[in-house]
Image (spheres, grey):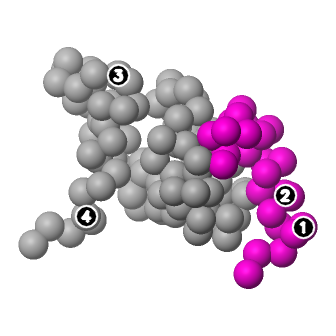
Amino acid sequence: MVSEKKMLNFIETFLGLGFSREELVMMVKCFPQCLVHSTEMVTKIIEFMVKEMNWSVTVSLFPHVISYSLDKRIVPRCNVIKALMLKGLLRSEPTSVSSAWHVPVKLS
């Protein structure tokens, strides 16, 4: 169970990062576990995607991404995405890279 204080902190953090109330509601509906993640880590992930990847605040399209490790999963995959975009093999819109978040870490 998430405390009221933690939930309010979560809401303030996301609204402060530029999410709309509608995006926030959609995130919680699609991925309620996002409420238990550290707002500090969520902020780092969002800032990385906005500053390093030049994406708008679009993690709400893939809310489960905030549960991934920034160093072990997000940064390496984003580096591959950047390389593919530079070669023109991938569009620059985040929706075109949604499959990168769904591929398992280890393929059998």
- Give, as a three-letter code, the residue at label 1: Lys
Residue corresponding to mark 4: 104
* Badge 4 amino acid: Pro
**Does 54 appear above or below 68?**
above
Q: Residue furthest bottom?
A: 1
The picture places residue 18, in percent across and down from the top left corner, at 71, 32
The magenta span reads: 1-25
Tell me the element at label 4. Answer: loop
Cα distance between the residues tagged 3 and 1: 37 Å
Query: Disc 2 and disc 4: Cα gap in Å?
Result: 31 Å
First in sequence, mark 3 or 1: give its number.
1
- The answer, for residue 70, to whether it is visible in the render is no
Who comes first in sequence, dot 2 or dot 4?
2
Q: Closer to the observer: label 1 or label 4?
A: 1
Q: For residue 92, which numbered disc appears in the image?
A: 3
Magenta stretch holds residue 18: yes
Q: Are marks 1 and 2 in contact (CB under 8 Å)?
A: yes
Inspect the magenta stretch and tell me whether residue 54 lies in it: no
Residue at the image point whose x is 68% and y is 65% from the top: 35
The amino acid type, in three-letter code, at marker 2 is: Asn
Identified at 80% across, 63% down, the residue is 7
The residue that appears at 84% across and 57% down in the rendered structure is 9
Name the side, left or right, on which 41 lies relative to 58: right
Judge from the rendering whether residue 18 lies leftward or rightward of residue 99; answer left or right. Answer: right
Distance between the Cα atoms at labels 4 and 3? 22 Å
Q: How far apart are labels 1 and 2 at the CA level?
A: 6 Å
> Earlier along the polypeptide chain: callout 4 or callout 3?
3
The residue indicated by pointer 1 is: 5
Residue 34 at what x, y percent from top left?
Answer: 61, 62
The image shows residue 101, relative to residue 47, as above or below, that is below
